[in-house]
Amino acid sequence: MRSSDIAEIRKLPLFKDVSEDNFARLMRGAYMQTFPPFVDLITEGDSSDFLHIVFEGSIELYAQWNGRESTLGTLRPISTFILAATIKDAPYLMSARTLEKSRVILLPSADVRETFLRDQDFSRAIVDELATCYRTTVKYSKNIKLRNSVERLANYLLRKNKAFGNANVYELPIEKRRLASFLRMTPENLSRSLKTLRDHGAEVDGNTVRISNLEKLSEFSKPTPLIDDPDC
């Protein structure tokens, strides 16, 4: 890998406090690969041979069962997946595929586990990231179980509006079919929910979101940091 790529990895919270020697050992076995869109990177049930780092592009995490498929999340640079399977040396619980041309760094899982045992700063960083992932999963579960479909959609639009700098006009970051799957909705239900939100201060035309009345939308959606704040 290029030294500039390694420097970017070094900035990740997971690696920034690792000793120079241990970080160098991790990078010796790492390599970067470029993938075209819609290529499967890992398949649920397979052995966790590598820890993956999204360096460019976007990755969809999804799962399948009994002929059904559901989107579980979308990753963008620079982020890792799937850490828990790597540390436990367990099968992947999710599959992952590229949504666009993507560059992904792969670190052998055995090297990651060895460094976890050798480097206390690295092990603390891993525990912190796994705790963050756990809390994210709990928030997602609360969102699905406690809110109806229109409330889930309204809060999603509010979260993305905040992420895009409160511009009140932005483009959906994923296509509507995947958004419906992520929010546990059918495409038809998503379409109906979008129409409902017109009366609550938000309109989606194609992929363009326009929030005309942020106060009204917030009053309807009732966001809470215990579900909607990624830093909480």
Image (spheres, helix red, strand yellow):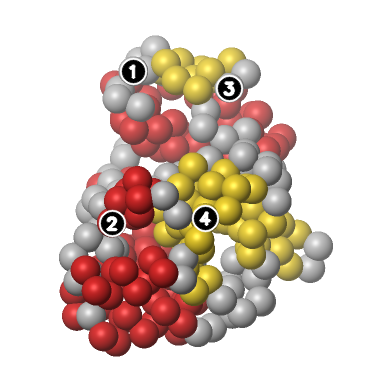
The amino acid type, in three-letter code, at marker 1 is Ala
* SS category of the residue bearing label 4: strand
Q: CA–CA distance between discs 4 and 2?
A: 15 Å
Q: Nearer the viewer, residue 154 or 157?
A: 157
* SS category of the residue bearing label 1: loop
Q: Earlier in the sequence, mark 1 or mark 4?
A: 4
Q: Earlier in the sequence, mark 4 or mark 2?
A: 2
Identified at 48% across, 77% down, the residue is 109
Eyeballing the image, is 21 above or below 182? below
Identified at 64% across, 29% down, the residue is 192
Q: Nearer the viewer, mark 3 or mark 2?
A: 2
* SS category of the residue bearing label 2: helix
Q: Which mark is residue 32?
A: 4
Disc 2 packing (10 Å; few <14; some 14–19; many ≥20): some
C-beta proximity under 8 Å, tags 3 and 1: no
Q: Which mark is residue 207?
A: 3
Q: Which residue is mark 2?
A: 10
Q: Which residue is mark 1?
A: 167
Q: CA–CA distance between discs 4 and 3?
A: 32 Å
Q: x, y percentage for residue 6?
A: 35, 54
Examine the rendering and report whether any part of residue 115 can be seen: yes
Residue placed farthest to the top in the image? 212
Disc 1 packing (10 Å; few <14; some 14–19; many ≥20): few
